[in-house]
Amino acid sequence: MARLEKIVSNFVFFLLFLLAFLLIFESHVTIPYWLQPVGRMHPMVLHFPIALIVMLVLLDLFQSHLEPASFEKVHKVLLYATAVTTSLSAIMGFFLSKEEGYTSDLMALHKWIGVSVSYLVYLLLLTDQKKWWYKITLYSSLVILFFAGHFGAGLTHGMDFLLEPITKNQKKEFTENTPVFEAFIDPILEAKCKGCHNHQKRKGDLDMTSYALMTRGGEHGPVWIQGNPAGSEIIKRALLPLEHEHHMPPEGKPQLTGSELALLKSWISAGADANVSMAQLDPSDTLLMLAKQRMKARQGGGNRPRYDFDFASKDLVASLNNPYRTVVQQTPGSPALDVNIFVKQAFKSEYISELKKIKDQVVSLNLAYMPVKDDDLTTIAALGNLEKLNLNHTDITSAALAYLDKCTRLNSLSLSGTAVDMQLSDGLGQLPALKDVYLWNTSITHDNLTELKKQWPAIRFHLGYQANEEDLIRLTPPLLKNKNKVLERGERIVLEHKLPGVSIRYTIDGSDPDSISSLIYQKPIEIQSFTDIKTIAYKEGWLTSEVQVFEFFVKGASPVEAGLINPPSRKYQGKGAMSLMDFEKGEATNFRAKPWLGYKDKPFAAWVDFGEKPPALQQMVLSFGINMGQYIMPPVQVEIWGGNDLNDVKLLKRLTPPPPDAYRPDAVSGMRVPFATSNFRYYKIKALPVKKLPPWHAGKGSAGWVFVDELFFY
């Protein structure tokens, strides 16, 4: 037993010595990716020392009730187990703290308090349990442990986590004069984003606790780009597949709902103004409509319709369900029932008449596309609590509305695709609760609609889109059949369009194609090196499609070896120099993927070796990424040097392209660098990132990134 105690004691001493070493040289410590899972075990392991310290305290309190021999054995086992798990937890916590996002003052408090607990517990090993200072050390450990846990919970859930159930019910009152950001946008971000992006836990160096901090952004740029939801980080990441490593919120966390995403998109599209209120928005603005829906849901969230009628028996409801009719509770705990009848060929009038058995409970009835006649509505009229009736694409006429006079609670009536006409106005007066009438694809015209609105101002009439014979529909862009963007020599580019009779026009000189003078796609296209192919689809009687750009690289001369002169950023190391010659292309949505090498503080600089029999070359193409929202820009300058001695090369070409003057779509692009024909063995390539982002960029003045995934030589 004494030998085991000595081994465990020495092991704990080693762990604490290692911990001290890591803390002293913390600024120089980088945790390799294969060790990061050990750090992520910290939240799991830390529960052991918490429980064990509490057990030690309880054991000390009830010592007098235990036999001395039994107490001594239990005490030693608990004490050594506590020392080992506390030390391991502290080291794992250190590993975890070295990952991105753990740089706050709260993190420092949690770390140093946790470290102090591990050393205090080790002191317990060296202290006689009968001495008074043992008790001081033990109880001090418990008190300090409480603060360590509190700050740790603050890192994970926020410092208001403890009192959140109380403060959560202290709802703010919002009006139409409250800024949309304050009333609707910020609460979404609070629930779905700020747990990982706050003062204490800045994942991706992003703090979202205020509008100003969100605008400033993190290491990938601002959270949004005003007026450009598609280019905004928050939208792009939310739309990634759930399993994607850059999807936000991460898998396992509460996700943005469809309505929340629509509201965020509309707010960004409207300019992402922190001060604009509902009262200042145009009545037709989509943002206003979505905000009103959210306000209505908030105001009525705790006041869902209450029904004073009884529940239908479960057996009765079950008997009414069949393969062509469903009868279900509208919400759990509510007596209201929703009924759907479907399959036109199997329809029977009895499916409606049998509903009289639950006439008080039916509040919603869907008969869309059923062969329902006017007479069938006499049966429906018996459903006195009916609130929503869908008669879309049925055989009813305007006269049928006269049969619904007993449906005094009906507030939504769908008549799209029916034979109703202006005579329906005669029956609307019998429906005092009616709020919405849907009239898409009927004989009702816009002029008729104006007349109906004048006669029934309390009813909203929805006519939908009315096609105009003079309106033209825009074609979709051409499609690409090739799967790879890096082509073999002789491999051709295949384009297609799904609509018959469409002509595809294209250019390969950088100009935008038109429907008159541009090349007509008649057969697969062959290219010799990096090429931008711009395409459009054209057909008489249709609007020409938007321009679709496809960028292709062709495999050229392959070096026998490559190396990096400047190492890439620690977070974006790809596969090292192998990334430059493996013909694997990166994507503009995931710059942590293996193909990418990222540079910010230093220029990209690499060398290639073509061996003892180098080919004659006259062009190099640098493949780089563009994601301006993440501060990833085209290089401001590219140089290529050549020579037969790696230490003695001469400048062959220096290219300084014009800087972009506005945001560009995310893309993987290429830059051609031509030079005089040469057959050097060695070439050095250098690409400079932008030192200060331009004034039009949201991160103006900040340093930009250059990301490279491949070098091609021709």
Image (cartoon, rainbow, N blue to C red):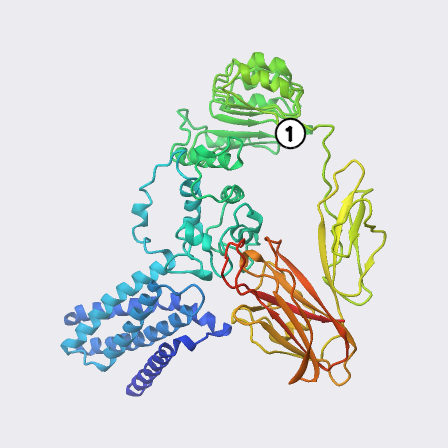
The picture quadrant where one finds residue 91 is bottom left
At a point 44% along the width and 72% down the height, the residue shown is 38
Q: Which residue position holds label 1?
A: 465
Residue under the image location 45 percent in, 34 percent down: 280
**Mark 1: secondary structure:** loop
In the image, residue 685 sits, relative to residue 490, either above or below, namely: below
Quadrant where the C terminus lies? bottom right
Residue at left 34%, top 59%? 153
Residue 428 location (% of width, % of height): 54, 15
Q: Is residue 330 above or below residue 480?
A: above
Q: Quadrant of the N terminus?
A: bottom left
Q: Is residue 349 above or below residue 558?
A: above
Q: Residue 423 appears at what percent x and percent y? A: 62, 13
Q: Position of residue 484 (x, y in %)?
A: 72, 62
Depth check, front residue: 693 or 252: 693
Residue lying farthest right?
Answer: 522
Q: Is 573 or 268 nearer to us in this picture?
A: 268
Q: Is residue 402 in view from this perspective?
A: no
Mark 1 residue type = Tyr
